[in-house]
Image: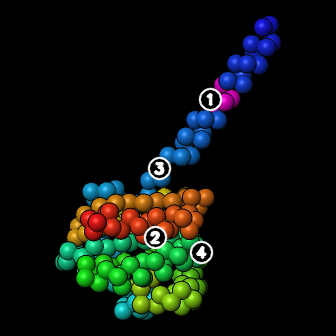
Amino acid sequence: MNRRDLGVLAWTTAAACAGLARAEALQEELRSGPPVGGSPLPFTSNLVTGPYRGKQHCYVCELRETDHPAVLVFARSLNEPTARLLRGLRDAIQERKKEKLFGWFVFLDEGKAEAELEARLEQFARENSALSLPISALGDPQGPPGYRIAGEAEVTLLYFRKDKILANRAFRTREWNNGAAGKVLRDLDSVFGWR
């Protein structure tokens, strides 16, 4: 092998290693929201559906007084995987009445008028037969103060009970699909110990 061939081989090897490092970095688990073991922080947002429709309410505050299992979903898009999660969580709450499972969605928006987002959310809930499930709008892309929802997170789910986060799942746009939505719904049993 001559010097030129060695140079090409070295460059090709370096490029392949750099490509692998980038691929591994892309596969790293996305960190979004408070960590497991932490506490969900109290916050209010404009509720579009559910019993507090048209008001601001702190569900975290309410749930701290109980031992009810809860799922808090932060989402950015009104797409089919999010609709599947919405319908699935609605159904899981009905199926888990005995366990008093509670869940709600907070849709994050980047600087658009919250009134416009609220109208779209109400229509989204109506189309998915989920008007009874609490859904709210929040005009901050990082979520409520202290939550630090990652900018690349399409969906962030926090599973908690009382004052402790038991699981945190976050998905980038390219990872968020119907399969991922189904998986997080199946996680309910293992996270809350219902198996």
- Return the residue at label 1: 17
Residue pictured at 54% horizontal, 46% vertical: 27
Q: How crowded is mark 2: few (under 14 residues within 10 Å), some or many (20 or more)?
A: many
Q: Nearer the viewer, mark 4 or mark 3?
A: 4
Q: Which of marks 2 and 1 is nearer the N terminus?
A: 1
Which mark, residue 29? 3
Is residue 88 or residue 70 the one in the foreground? Answer: 88
Q: Specify the amino acid type for callout 1.
A: Cys
Which mark, residue 190? none
Residue 134 appears in which quarter of the rendering? bottom left
- Give the spatial CA distance, label 4 vs label 2: 15 Å
- Give the spatial CA distance, label 1 vs label 4: 36 Å
The C terminus: image quadrant = bottom left
In the depicted structure, whether residue 86 falls above or below residue 146: below
Element carrying mark 4: helix
- Residue span colored magenta: 14-18
Is residue 182 or residue 82 the one in the foreground? Answer: 182
- Return the residue at label 2: 74
Residue pictured at 57% horizontal, 89% vertical: 127
Question: What x and y, as percent, mark residue 45?
Answer: 41, 80
Count of numbered labels shown in the rendering: 4
- Return the residue at label 4: 80
Q: Could one spot residue 87 in this view of the protein? A: yes
Q: Earlier in the sequence, mark 2 or mark 3?
A: 3
Question: What x and y, as percent, mark residue 65?
Answer: 19, 78
